[in-house]
Each structure stands twice: as C-alpha cells, then as structure tokens.
Image (spheres, rainbow, N blue to C red):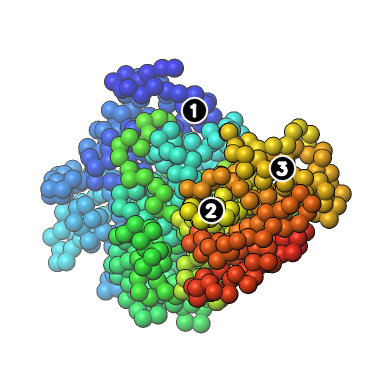
C-alpha cells in the first residue's frame, strides 16, 4: 500500500493489478476530474494528455506529468474572453497551437472546404481538402484535436480574404492498432468481479460506493459502444449521469441535446451525399429526448426504419450504417406513479411514446431510476484505463461477436418473439464482449447467466410497456431461460412487483403461494412457502419456533407425499430426500393452520424441479388418509386472493357452490381452479 504525495488516495489491490497489466495505459481518474470544468474541453481530452504524460503509478512522475498537462491546457485551450488574445498571438507569431473542437463544411461558392473553430468564434478558416478527406467526421459535428493554426497577413488584406489556416491536425487519440490485443491480454489477469470494477473505474465511478444492481446498470450503459446497431433507452431522475458516458468519455460518441434533429445531419444529405452521424459515430445519443423532433414529417419513420435494419435510403440508393441509437431523458414523477398514470415510455416525444412498432425496435430499456443521484463520493480517485484507449478497444469490439461461443448453451422460453430474441442476443453479446475482450476466452455459466438475466429484464421492460398499450398483442411477457440442462428460470422487472407480491411469472421450483383460512375474526392469511430438496438429511420446518398448527400442516403434507409418492413424483423416493420448508406469513394471520395442500405442492414441485403456474394461490387442507377437507369461507379466500394480485385460486371442488355469490370484480379478475384430490391439484397447478 502506498500513498501519493499531496493526496489522500491509497492504492489498493486492484490498482496494483491494473498497473501490472496495463502499464502505460492507466490514469488516476481523480486527476482527470481536476480539469473538468476548469478548461473548455470534455474529460476525455484531459485524459488524453494525462495518458500521454501521467500513465504511471510513480508519484513523482505523476506530479511532473501533471505540471506539463496543466501548462498545455492553460496555453492551448481557449477560455471565454480569450478569443482575441489567441487570434493576436497567431498574427504576431504567424502560428499558434490549439486544442479545440474543429468542424468543417463545403463552401459551394468557392468550391473549397472551410473549418470552424467554435472557441475562437471563427467560421471561415481555410483547411486542406486532403485533411477533410482523411477525417470525414469533420463534416458531421467535428472532433477535438491538436491544431496548428496559421495566419497570413497578405490574405487578410484581400477582399473577403481568409487569413487563418488549419495547417496540421492531430485527432485526440492515444491508442494503437494492437490496442484490443493489449486489452485482452491484460484482462486475463483479472477475475470477472475485478474486471467489472476496473471498467467502472475507467469511466469514473467508484464500485465500492455502488450496490451490485447499480454496477450492473452502469455496465449496461456501455453496451452501445461495443455493439453495432444497438438501440437503447434510459429514462430516470435528473442528476444520475445519463449523458456523461456519451459526452465526456469517448470521442466515438456524439450527443444531440434536446431540440430539432435534421434528417440530413442524422442520416444523409441528399444534396451532397454526405453520410450523417449514424455513419460517422459508433453511438449517437439523444439527450433530453422528450424535446427531440425532426425537421421532416417522416423523420421518425426514417429513424424507425434505420433502428430496424441499419439502413436508410438516399433516392434509390440504400445506405448501411452501424451507429447505435441511445435515447436518454428524465422522469418528472416517480416510477410507481408513472405506471399508474400511463407507461414508462411516456416521456418520449409524441411521435414515439405510444407507437408499439417503435418500441419493438428498442433492444433494452435501462432502469435509470436504479442509478443513484451522483455526488463527488461516487467518483473514483483510483486508477482506470485511459478513456481514449478504452474507447478505441470498444470500437474494435464492435466487429466481433461472442454468440457463436455460447451457441446451444441457453434456451429461451416460448414467450420471446423473433424481435425479442434478437434484442436479448444483442444485449448478451454486448455484455459478454465487455467482460471478455478476448473472443477465444471461455465464458463461464455464471457470467453467461448474469448477462442473460440483465438482457431479458431490459427487453421485458420494453414488452411490458407495449402490453399496457396493446394488451392483446403483447400479453405474454413471461420471459424465461434455461442454462444447459438446468431448471427454467423466469426473469421479472423489479418495478412491476415486490418480492412479496404475486406476479404472472412462475415462482422457482419448490415455491408456492398459499392461503390459510384463519378464523372469523382474523380472516384469511397469505403465506409464501419455500421448500428445498436435498439428498439425505432430515425433513422439517426451518422456521424459528413454528406454531403447533404449522407443524401439523407440514406433518400432513409429508405423510400424504410418502403415501402417494408413486402418483405424485413417480420413481423418486421422498423418504430418501431431505425436504425442508420455510413458511413466511405475509399478513397478520401467522398460525400456519390448514396449509397442508400448499405445502404438499411445494414439496412435489421441489422434487420434480418444475414450477407451478404464475399468479396462482393454493388453498386447502388434507386429511391423514389422503382426503381433502372442505373450506368454510371460500368467498373470503377469493376476495383475499384478488386483493393480493392473484389471477387464479386453487380450491377443493366442494367450495364451488360457495363462490356463486362472489362480487363481479372478483369473478372477472380471479379464475377458480377446482381439484378433487392431491394428484388432481398437482396436475392443475403445474406450469405447462
């Protein structure tokens, strides 16, 4: 452990590992934040210089390099009010060195290209045709570069003369051709968890301040940089850094602030044939998306077509591009309220917000509300990869794929349409490229499942908003997967349900919602039952101090399972299994009385490794001889099931007549499934 002079930063194990793996490609991220706001350039420009002069962990070398960077930034960036000073220096010395954003356009009157240097207020600087040809991005928003600006007094005396000339231009770029190979070689020294943390530090965040969920969301923000034609939306509160990655970190991204977007600038200029932003940048991000509109009526349709196929037309010619589209914007209300009054894509512009076809082209909806409001404590003071090096590697990863390496290892549920599968595969591919820059590296099942769960959740979030608009067409949103020969797992979106809420998604095998009748004073009670199946060992309840009634329910369920094993679980032997149950009471009623049928279903589900139907609550009690006891307050059970969000209630058939007088609301929202015995109940409860 060492401490850098003049700083409270203590280098940790990850710093040491990164220094050994990426010597010359690291920068202390708090150094970069020193320049943020102090000079009129994005963060990655400062990091470019820091990477050139401070790419070391040696404190003395860092201090020396920092002094050089400060001098260069002070001497070569133009602050507000210094425009005339720099012009004067160019006139007196005939040349001046700048670090500035440079753009170019074709002046049709003179048939020459002219450059624009915004910080100097110059719009008509001469620039060579060869320079523009070698750097086409000059024509679509420009980029930051080190510039030698010349001044010719003789031309200044001519009528309409243009005395300023961009002599030489060097894009802000540190990386080399073998950058990706270096990234892949360095990655091999890290565990997956360490690598995720280094990626987060490399874009400025301190992972120790973030929950696992927050880390996952921030990693998902990086996918558009490594995946071609990836369409993502992120909506959430202000102050969560939604546009930071697309504005400050990579020169391969372009940020469009809220307002009008022209078709010519985005896609193609029909007058000149010049390709637009999606052909010039890896990522085009619309900031404050609620205010975005196009200058042509068919602008949204052109973008919708591009998001679908990666193509757009110029007359009869079809043009391909691979720029990803990211839409970011703010919620003015909280998520729960937004779901009550509409859907979670309501902040989009009117032309997009209720268009299910447009939504279908979104590969992922990133939950921006899960990112904390950022304050300085969330920004890292440790080492991370130089942004320019990292963004260059990301750009090269776009031409690779990890899908062939995982082919046949994941099976998705039938609920996914063709577009859903394409979207999920793109997200999985992108996340795995971030984790495994080496295409030959083996992907572990754990990392594969991590990527699959994130991809399914973020695509399902899109599907849920479509369902709110067109319920009939998009009704099946139960997204599930199976890794290899494992058990099918279902993925939910966290904002739609709480852990103790009943959803349409099946619970994992061994888990059941159960209703106990309670008594006339307390009414019914909801329980969540979780049974674990292990070979050997003893069976029993894991609840601390279970009630006598709950112990009796468990005993009846266990005895019925042993007596009816052949008809319930086939050749499996319950006597050789250790079935342990945890019963959680979610209402004031906690006795656990009358739960033997739900407990039996949980035991058989665990042994069969099959889930029960989503949205189902089971009720009923068994006798020691295998019979079914009648329920006495079926209508109250039905009312309680509806209040808890259930869509189906499994009941003894003897309760059928009691349900004739339930309210119309209960009858329309809850379907009743009747059983005659334990086997009948199991067959009707299993998820098909």
Q: Which residue is mark 2?
A: 519
Q: Earlier in the sequence, mark 1 or mark 3?
A: 1
The kind of secondary structure element at disc 3 is helix
Q: Position of residue 459 (x, y in %)?
A: 53, 60
User: Which callout, 3 or 2, points to the residue nearer the camera?
Assistant: 2
Q: Quadrant of the C terminus?
A: bottom right
Left or right, 600 with reference to 65: right
The kind of secondary structure element at disc 2 is loop
Q: Earlier in the sequence, mark 3 or mark 2?
A: 2
Left or right, 429 with reference to 346: right
The kind of secondary structure element at disc 1 is helix
Q: Which residue is mark 3?
A: 555
Q: Which residue is mark 1?
A: 14
Q: Which dot marks residue 595?
A: none
Q: Residues within 10 Å of mark 2 (few under 14, many from 20)?
A: few
Q: Position of residue 467 (x, y in %)?
A: 50, 70
Task: Report if residue 448 is visible in the image.
Answer: no
Q: Residue at x 18, y 63 (%)?
A: 161
Where 198 falls versus 509 (above or below)?
Answer: above
Q: Position of residue 439 (x, y in %)?
A: 64, 46
Q: Quadrant of the N terminus?
A: top left
Q: Residue 355's quadrant in the figure?
A: bottom left
Near-viewer residue (652 or 79): 652
Q: Residue 51's quadrant in the figure?
A: top left
Q: CA distance from mark 3 to mark 2?
A: 21 Å
Task: Report if residue 341 is visible in the image.
Answer: yes
Q: Position of residue 101 (x, y in %)?
A: 29, 52
Q: Residue at x 87, y 49 (%)?
A: 571
């Amino acid at each position: 452990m060492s401490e850098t002079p003049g700083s409270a930063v203590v280098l940790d194990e990850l710093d040491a590992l990164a220094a050994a793996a990426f010597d010359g490609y690291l920068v202390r991220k708090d150094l970069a934040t020193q320049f943020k706001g102090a000079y009129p350039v994005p963060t990655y420009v400062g990091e470019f210089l820091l990477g050139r002069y401070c790419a070391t962990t040696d404190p003395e070398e860092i201090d020396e390099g920092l002094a050089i960077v400060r001098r260069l930034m002070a001497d070569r960036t133009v602050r507000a009010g210094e425009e005339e000073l720099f012009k004067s220096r160019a006139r007196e010395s005939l040349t001046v060195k700048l670090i500035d954003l440079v753009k170019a356009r074709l002046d049709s009157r003179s048939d020459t290209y002219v450059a624009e240097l915004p910080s100097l207020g110059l719009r008509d600087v001469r620039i060579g045709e060869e320079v523009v040809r070698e750097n086409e991005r000059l024509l679509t928003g420009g980029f930051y570069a080190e510039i030698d600006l010349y001044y010719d007094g003789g031309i200044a005396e001519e009528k309409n003369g243009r005395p300023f000339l961009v002599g030489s231009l060097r894009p802000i770029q540190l990386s080399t051709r073998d950058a990706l190979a270096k990234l892949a070689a360095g990655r091999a020294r890290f565990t997956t968890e360490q690598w995720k943390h280094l990626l987060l530090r490399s874009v400025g965040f301190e992972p120790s301040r973030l929950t696992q969920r927050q880390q996952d969301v921030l990693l998902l923000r990086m996918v558009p940089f490594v995946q071609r034609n990836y369409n993502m939306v992120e909506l959430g509160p202000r102050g969560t850094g939604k546009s930071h990655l697309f504005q400050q970190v990579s020169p391969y991204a372009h940020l469009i602030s809220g307002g009008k977007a022209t078709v010519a600038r985005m896609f193609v200029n029909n007058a000149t044939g010049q390709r637009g932003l999606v052909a010039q940048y890896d990522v085009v991000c619309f900031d404050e998306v609620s205010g975005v509109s196009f200058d042509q009526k068919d602008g949204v349709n052109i973008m919708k077509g591009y998001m679908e196929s990666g193509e757009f037309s110029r007359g009869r010619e079809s043009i391909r591009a691979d720029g990803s589209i990211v839409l970011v914007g703010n919620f003015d209300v909280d998520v729960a309220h937004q779901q009550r009054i509409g859907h979670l894509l309501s902040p989009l512009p009117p032309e997009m917000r209720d268009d299910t076809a447009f939504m279908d082209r979104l590969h992922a909806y990133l939950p921006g509300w899960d990112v904390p409001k950022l304050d300085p404590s969330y920004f890292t003071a440790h080492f991370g990869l130089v942004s320019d090096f990292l963004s260059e590697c990301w750009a090269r990863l776009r031409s690779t794929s990890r899908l062939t390496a995982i082919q046949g290892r994941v099976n998705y549920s039938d609920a996914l349409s063709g577009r859903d599968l394409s979207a999920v595969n793109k997200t999985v591919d992108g996340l795995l490229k971030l984790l495994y820059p080496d295409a030959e590296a083996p992907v572990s099942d754990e990392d594969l499942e991590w990527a699959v769960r994130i991809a399914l959740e973020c695509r399902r979030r899109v599907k849920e908003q479509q369902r709110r608009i067109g319920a009939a067409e998009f009704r099946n949103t139960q997204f599930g997967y199976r890794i290899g020969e494992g058990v099918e797992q279902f993925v939910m979106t966290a904002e739609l349900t709480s852990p103790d809420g009943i959803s349409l998604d099946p619970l994992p095998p061994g888990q059941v919602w159960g209703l106990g009748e309670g008594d006339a004073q307390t009414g019914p009670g909801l329980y969540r039952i979780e049974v674990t199946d292990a070979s050997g060992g003893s069976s029993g309840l894991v609840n601390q101090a279970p009630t006598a009634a709950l112990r009796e329910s468990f005993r009846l369920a266990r005895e019925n399972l042993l007596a009816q094993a052949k008809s319930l679980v086939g050749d499996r032997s319950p006597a050789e299994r250790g079935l342990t149950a945890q019963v959680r009471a979610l209402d004031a009623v906690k006795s656990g009385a009358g739960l033997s049928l739900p407990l039996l279903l949980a035991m058989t589900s665990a042994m069969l490794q099959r889930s029960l139907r989503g949205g189902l609550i089971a009720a009923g009690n068994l006798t020691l001889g295998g019979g079914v006891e009648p329920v006495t307050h079926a209508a109250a059970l039905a009312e309680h099931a509806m209040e808890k969000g259930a869509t189906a209630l499994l009941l003894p058939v003897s309760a059928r007549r009691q349900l004739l007088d339930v309210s119309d609301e209960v009858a329309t929202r809850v379907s009743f499934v009747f059983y005659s015995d334990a086997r009948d109940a199991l067959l009707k409860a299993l998820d098909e």
